[in-house]
Image (spheres, rainbow, N blue to C red):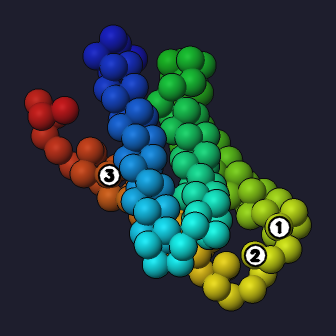
Amino acid sequence: MNEQDSQGSSDIYWGLLRTQGLAILAVVLMVSVIRGPADLLLAGWGGAISLIAYAWAGFQLWMHPGNREPARQTGAPIRAEVGKVVVILALFGWTFSQWPDVGESSALIILAGAFLWTYLCGLVWLHWWTTREPQDR
């Protein structure tokens, strides 16, 4: 991995996290208008679950210093995806165990909707970044 590859990896990582951060702000603002301030934390946490999972996966793929070795590069996508799933399941499990009101339908819709919105915004951004021409990056 040369210096240009390293810069590109850094750009994709931080761009993804910025995009998801903006998606969280958008969903929190939308929930504040539709539902009021009581559900802001729930919407923010739903988006944060996605952000934390993507931060883990992105670090494993693009930022981990050990992945400069060819032997580790082949396993990085597997570690990233498995870790992302584990982080998502752990955070949702922790949420349901510590926040019993989330089990009711309106709270669950807000939490899951914010998570999905943030997750999809990250996927769209990744698709946009990876399909651009290399000179436009």
> In this picture, is 31 found above or below 135?
below
Query: In the shown orientation, is residue 81 left or right of residue 25?
Result: right
Please, which residue is most extreme toward the front here?
37
Q: Which residue is mark 1?
A: 99
Disc number for residue 102: 2
Q: Position of residue 118 (x, y in %)?
A: 47, 60
Relative image position of residue 97 (x, y in whole percent) = 88, 67
- Name the amino acid, label 1: Trp
Residue occupying image coordinates x 41% and y 33% = 14
**Amino acid type shown at disc 3:** Trp
- Who is closer to the viewer here, 67 or 74? 67
Looking at the image, which residue is at 45% across and 47% down?
21
* Side (left or right) of 79 relative to 132: right
Disc 1 residue crowd, few under 14, some 14–19, many 20+, Cα 10 Å: few
**Nearer to us in this view, 116 or 56:** 116
Instruction: Name the amino acid, label 2.
Output: Val
Mark 2 and mark 1 in contact? Answer it, CB < 8 Å: yes
Which residue is depicted at the point 34% across and 29% down?
A: 11
Q: Which residue is mark 3?
A: 125
- Look at 33% across and 11% down and name the residue there: 3
- N-term-proximal mark, 2 vs 3: 2
Image quadrant where one finds the N terminus: top left
Residue 43 in sight here: yes
What is the quadrant of residue 101 in the picture? bottom right
In the image, is 11 to the left or to the right of 108?
left
Q: Does the residue at mark 3 contact the one at mark 1 (Cβ under 8 Å)?
A: no
Using the numbered discs, state the Cα–Cα distance from disc 2 to disc 1 in whole angstroms: 6 Å
* Marks 2 and 3 close (CB-CB < 8 Å): no
